[in-house]
Image: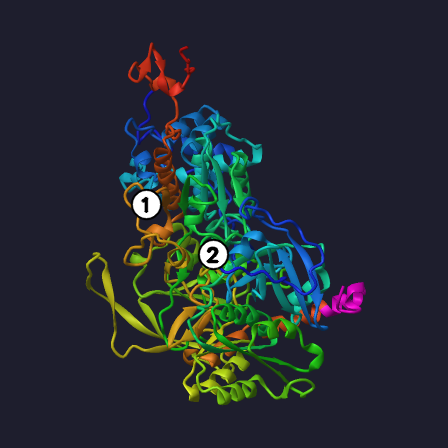
């Protein structure tokens, strides 16, 4: 077969249907509907299968992207899925929520020229993940039992990724989750129309199938401490992936008014507690008609689009910088704009005013302009003098980031950094021997895939710490030369029997 | 370690052998209810089996309970815990839809769908020599382990509890066992002194000039009254705040309260705060946030119960 070139591949991305904005803004069904088979295969044809693939380097968990695409082209979908899941555990999740434009798709040579769009790697990953769920594919891992028990704190993406790798390596893994449902941010944070609960359930099922036990309703730190886990509870190692923590507020006058809440609270009420279905579910929502969301990250986008679907008539985004600096995924921003969310760039709130009953009535804002670049290189916004104006709103949602959760700091001797996150070395080891940490509780708020990457990295470190082989390196016979072999038999096969000499 | 040996709940019926390792089998959901005691037509006690929690719980901490898959997360201060029996005790006041439903459906021998905790920073049992422990409404039960902890730390404990009338009084014998002085206040004077707990506090403060600390648990309006009562005496007054919560782990920020003009989260920074620095008006305003929905839910629930004539609604008890 002749090598594909940038000219010979399909120039346009294959079509992935999405729900029309006017319709989807009123339901919680998924916005992006995913490829069908012909379109998935068409998109596969756009991959150049580069000899030195930049996309693998660009992926936080180093998925062999050209590898799985090649198998898809050969219609070996299950083989493609197996290859994919060597690296990622949650393809149906990551295909949906990864910021691919900054990762694999961002370095794809197809898109490098600027005229073509990069290969839609995320959508292909999602297609394989969905197909696996539909077909009930489970990758069979040969698990060689090890006499080690590992406790994992938090069932979000970091904890799940770490648990899966360690379970595959033969450890007995228990995940402790404080909420009553597992999944962490995938459950309480990311809304149904972006990541359906059924997908989260399926991915959690895949982890349980590896023998991982998940204990909900268990608040580590308070029910038992990290030190107790290593001591009387008998865990050989612990991984902490508790997530980012407490929402930040701005300390503006009026933040105590009713109708002011964090995006975390809004999303938790809606996603975990299903407040949208009140009174069938007991948790109330209390959302108004004119919602102002402060911030423009992914959480802000989720909060706005959830508000719209829960019956808000107008949803506004208040952000102190411009669209260029907006930290949300491009696709989310685009979807939000399509659905009719109004963006107010270069606008910053200064005060929240209430009515006689203590409910939010008005958000007082100022206009901003971009000043000189700050230390981080971003141009910092400065207030335009005399630009104060009032903005009518009955609900104000803060989505301006989080501060570290204090519980483990309060209850253990773990060393924290200056900001209050858990201090780790490069291998993600904390100051306590045998305790590793990763995800938002180490880095501050980031993405699902970065948390998963951290979970996998910590799993590798834990395997080293426990002295078990790195099962993350998949045995691939065709790559094995005579190096690392005995009598021509690859050591990675572990096809040796211990012989006791009498 | 302090050993809490007295029977956790009124009327221990069946005892299970306590497990040697409480962490061996931590339940994920479905927690057995060992005993239930009704104190009045709205107040009832549940003793829930959870050996690990019984072992970890300290005075001042709370739990979140969930009735069923559709339930909301309801925070409740731990009223008592028994490490030998491996149980925690909760006292519930059936005042809203969720708590009314709990009253109707949770029975001895049944299970509770979800309970998580202990949450919050435990109360600091200071080296105070003389303390007043004040409880009113929902706060009567959870002030008991605090009084006991102070007693065990060697303090002179004055207990002040408030009820509407004589019939609603519970645990007076338990309080008398750990208090050097015990004052019951009732609205109608049917037992103890006639008046609010603030009157009891004033009496105690006037009789004892050397009170080091006052600890108050109860409805916000009562805690506010108590704080204002002790302020002129300049006695340190700790209160246990009960704002609206969702997750209870410091994630949602719904329970933020204003203390010393700063935002604090009751679930992870509290629930105990220096009462003289708490903005109670802010707390009481924020507690009203879902009033309309709460009223609707309760009305709808009552209507449903009437229509389906659920037998348990007849007596409000089991």
| Residue A128 visible | yes
Point out the frontmost of discs 1 and 2: 2
Q: Residue at x 58, y 48 (%)?
A: B27
Residue A422: x %, y % from top left: 33, 52
Q: Nearer the viewer, residue B34 or A269?
A: B34
Which type of secondary structure does the marked residue at label 2 adopt? loop
Earlier-in-chain disc, 1 versus 2: 1
How far from the left and from the top, in percent, is residue B1?
Answer: 48, 58
Residue B220 coordinates in the image, percent (x, y): 53, 78
Instruction: Decide which of A187, A153 is in the foreground and name it.
Output: A153
What span is in magenta? Answer: B302-318
Q: Residue at point 43% right, 35% down?
A: A165
The image quadrant of residue B44 is: bottom right
Q: In the picture shown, does residue A50 fall above or below B90? A: above
Chain holding disc 1: A
A468 to the left or right of B44? left
Q: Is residue B311 magenta?
A: yes
Mark 2 belongs to which subunit?
Answer: A
Which of the 4 image quadrants contains residue B317? bottom right
Q: Which residue was labeled with disc 1?
A: A102
Element under label 1? helix
Q: Is circle 1 on the same chain as circle 2?
A: yes
Percent position (x, y) of residue B187? 65, 86
| Vertical comparison of A372 with A441: above or below | below
B157 vs A164: above or below: below
Q: To which residue does mark 2 refer?
A: A222
Q: Quadrant of the C terminus of chain A?
A: top left
Marks 1 and 2, how far apart at CA: 38 Å
Q: Nearer the viewer, residue A132 or B274?
A: B274
How is the structure coloured here? rainbow
């Amino acid at each position: 077969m002749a090598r594909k070139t940038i000219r010979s591949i399909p120039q346009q991305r294959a079509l992935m249907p999405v729900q029309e904005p006017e319709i989807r803004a009123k339901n919680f069904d998924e916005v992006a509907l995913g490829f069908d088979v012909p379109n998935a295969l068409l998109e596969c044809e756009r991959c150049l299968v580069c000899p030195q693939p930049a996309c693998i380097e660009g992926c936080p968990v180093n998925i062999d992207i050209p590898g799985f695409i090649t198998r898809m082209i050969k219609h070996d979908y299950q083989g493609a899925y197996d290859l994919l899941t060597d690296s990622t555990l949650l393809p149906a999740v990551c295909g949906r929520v990864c910021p691919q434009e900054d990762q694999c798709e961002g370095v794809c040579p197809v898109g490098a020229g600027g005229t073509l769009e990069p290969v839609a790697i995320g959508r292909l990953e999602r297609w394989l993940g969905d197909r696996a769920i539909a077909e009930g594919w489970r990758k069979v891992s040969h698990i060689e039992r090890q006499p080690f028990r590992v406790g994992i704190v938090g069932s979000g993406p970091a904890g799940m990724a770490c648990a899966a790798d360690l379970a595959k390596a033969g450890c007995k893994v228990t995940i402790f989750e404080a909420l009553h449902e597992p999944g962490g941010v995938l459950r309480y944070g990311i809304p149904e129309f972006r990541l359906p609960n059924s997908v989260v359930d399926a991915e959690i099922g895949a982890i349980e199938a590896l023998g991982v036990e998940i204990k909900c309703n268990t608040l580590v730190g308070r029910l038992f401490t990290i030190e107790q886990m290593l001591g009387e509870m008998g865990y050989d190692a612990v991984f902490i992936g508790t997530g980012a923590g407490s929402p930040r507020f701005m300390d503006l006058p009026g933040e105590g008014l009713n109708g002011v809440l964090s995006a975390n609270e809004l999303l938790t009420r809606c996603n975990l507690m299903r407040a949208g279905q009140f009174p069938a579910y007991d948790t109330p929502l209390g959302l108004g008609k004119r919602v102002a969301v402060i911030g423009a990250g992914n959480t802000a986008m989720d909060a706005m689009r959830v508000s719209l679907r829960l019956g808000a008539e107008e949803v506004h985004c208040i952000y102190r910088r411009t669209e260029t600096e907006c930290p949300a995924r491009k696709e989310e921003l685009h979807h939000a704009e399509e659905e009719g969310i109004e963006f107010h760039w270069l606008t910053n709130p200064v005060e929240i005013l209430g009515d006689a009953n203590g409910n939010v009535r008005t958000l007082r804002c100022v206009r901003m302009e971009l000043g000189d670049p700050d230390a981080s290189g971003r141009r910092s916004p400065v207030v335009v003098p005399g630009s104060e104006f009032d903005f009518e709103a009955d609900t104000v949602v803060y989505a301006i980031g989080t501060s570290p959760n204090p519980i483990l700091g309060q209850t253990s001797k773990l060393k924290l950094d200056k900001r209050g996150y858990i201090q780790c070395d490069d291998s993600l080891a904390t100051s306590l021997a045998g305790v590793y940490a990763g995800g938002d509780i180490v880095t501050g708020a980031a993405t699902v895939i970065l948390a998963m990457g951290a979970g996998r990295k910590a799993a590798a470190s834990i395997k080293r710490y426990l002295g078990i082989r790195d099962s993350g390196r998949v045995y691939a016979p065709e790559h094995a030369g005579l190096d690392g072999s005995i009598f021509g038999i690859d050591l990675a096969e572990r096809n040796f029997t211990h012989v006791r000499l009498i | 370690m302090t050993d809490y040996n007295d029977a956790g709940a009124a009327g221990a019926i069946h005892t299970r052998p306590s497990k040697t390792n409480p962490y061996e089998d931590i339940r994920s959901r479905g927690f057995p209810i060992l005993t239930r005691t009704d104190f009045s037509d709205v107040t009832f006690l549940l003793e829930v089996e959870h050996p690990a929690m019984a072992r970890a719980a300290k005075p001042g901490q709370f739990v979140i309970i969930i009735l069923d898959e559709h339930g909301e997360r309801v925070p409740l201060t731990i009223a008592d815990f028994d490490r030998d029996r491996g149980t925690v005790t909760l006292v519930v006041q059936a005042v809203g839809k969720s708590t009314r439903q709990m009253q109707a459906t949770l029975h001895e021998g049944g299970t509770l769908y979800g309970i998580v905790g202990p949450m919050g920073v435990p109360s600091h049992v200071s080296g105070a020599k003389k303390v007043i422990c004040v409880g009113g409404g929902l706060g009567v039960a959870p002030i008991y382990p605090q009084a006991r902890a102070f007693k065990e730390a060697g303090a002179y404990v004055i207990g002040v509890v408030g009820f509407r009338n004589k019939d609603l009084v519970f645990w007076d014998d338990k309080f008398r066992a750990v208090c050097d002085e015990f004052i019951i206040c009732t609205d109608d004077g049917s037992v103890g002194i006639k008046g609010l707990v603030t009157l009891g506090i004033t009496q105690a403060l006037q009789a004892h000039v050397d009170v080091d600390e006052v600890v108050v648990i109860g409805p916000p309006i009562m805690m506010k009254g108590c704080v204002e009562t002790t302020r002129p005496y300049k006695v340190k007054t700790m209160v246990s705040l009960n704002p609206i919560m969702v997750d209870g782990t410091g994630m949602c920020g719904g329970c933020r309260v204003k203390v010393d003009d700063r935002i604090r989260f009751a679930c992870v920074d509290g629930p105990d705060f220096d009462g003289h620095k708490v903005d109670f008006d802010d707390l009481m305003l924020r507690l009203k946030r879902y009033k309309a929905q709460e009223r609707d839910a309760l009305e709808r629930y009552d209507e449903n119960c009437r229509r389906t004539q659920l037998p348990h609604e007849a007596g409000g008890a089991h």
